[in-house]
Image (cartoon, rainbow, N blue to C red):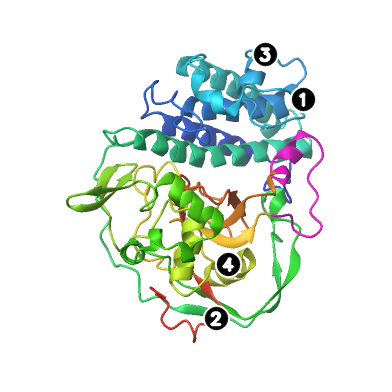
Amino acid sequence: MTTTSTFADTRSLRPLVDRYRAVRDLTERLAEPLSAEDQTVQSMPDVSPTKWHRAHTTWFFETFVLAEHVAGYESFDPAYGFLFNSYYEAVGPRHARVERGLLTRPGVAEVADYRRHVDAAMGGLLADAADGTGRLPERVVALVELGLNHEQQHQELLLMDIKHVLGANPLHPAYLPGDPSPVTGPGPHEPRWLAHPGGVVAAGHGGDGFAYDNESPRHEALLRPFAVRDTLVTCEEWLAFMADGGYHRAELWMSDGWATVQNEGWEAPGYWHPTRAGWFVQTLHGARAVAGAEPVVHVSWYEADAFARWAGARLPTEVEWEVTAAGRTAGHTAPGLTADALGTSLHPRAGGPDAEQWFGAVWQWTASPYTPYPGFRPAAGAVGEYNGKFMVNQQVLRGGACVTPAGHSRPSYRNFYPPGSRWPFTGVRLATDDPAASGTATGGGR
């Protein structure tokens, strides 16, 4: 579940009360621009409706905190346990994931009532402990903190999913009004290779603060000498890949990737549309011309791997990425989605002050399959299903995107998706075994 709780001192829970309110409020703010119709649509099996995200995150607190640790708690509606369980086998049966878009009822108003009901009960539980009239067991505090981090993950999913929903609309509507034009400013510097001598390194979460169980235990890994590029792959570079026939050259692709390209008819990254004026990209603020200096986003692992091969490079392993990022970002606060930043950074920007963009732009595919670290043991009970049972047929991503909530970007964070996924905010950073032999850090056309 977690390693070390941010609120380990259960005698001082006022910060936890404040954080609970802030996280729950941000979810509602993210849903606010959407109509009831917007919140009900499921545009593909991997997408969940907005109102389902709002209800499921509420179900988590009701199921794992209130129902188990508050005597006499009365559920809002017993049927919601079936409707809004996601994948917790130990909790019981659930509504099929692929049919979440068929749930016209409960509607958005009933979901809002559900959230208020659970928030009132949670508020009473936390307020009593914070005011000193009660005391929460450390396990309950850890469950609340897990629930908040879980809801923040769903805030990112909410934005990913509604982008797919709106992207399926031929009118290409915006999620939020505003100028979709790219933010102007300094572009990325000339890419450089960041060389590492290799050897035995430490990886995984080893400090204080919250971490998911899949980030542990901290362990040693042996690396050969390598280098990682200090900038992300840009749209300009991706256009060069496309112009060189990248989507039509079978020799660049893994077999499953080539089959996917053929079956899906991919010619460009997700949300790119050809027009007479050139390629346009759908953003959460509407459609606009592709900006060459921006990091490419919404590419699958298959595409990232093919691009790396075309560029005469490869994808970094997750440990290579982690040790490099940790050294480059030590002492820096990673950017992240907050209520104050909502609407200003919902598409990756070019360069800027943080030209290396380890965090805050796109999740970065790695060459590593999502498997357990040596000595990993899932937590006991239903919460042990949170991460461990997905450790197969997925690829690890590192970093954090422009829609990743604050606090979820750290060197040890392990995101994961199947290799064909394109609806997450996913991009590319290159690596190489021999930077001298790879020529420039831009590669291309080999």
Q: CA distance from mark 3 to mark 1?
A: 15 Å
* Alpha carbon distance from label 1 to label 2: 51 Å
> In the image, what residue occupies the spot 36% across and 76% down?
190
Residue 87 in sight from this viewpoint = yes
CA–CA distance in space, label 4 to label 3: 45 Å
* 217 to 406, vertically: above or below: below
Q: Is residue 151 placed above or below 289 in the rendered structure?
A: above
Residue where numbered disc 2 is placed: 195
Q: Nearer the viewer, mark 4 or mark 3?
A: 4
Type of residue at label 1? Glu
Magenta range:
371-389
Q: Quadrant of residue 64?
A: top right
What residue is pinned by disc 1?
A: 68
The residue carrying mark 4 is 321
Which numbered disc covers residue 78? 3
Q: Identify the mark nearer the N-term, 1 or 2.
A: 1
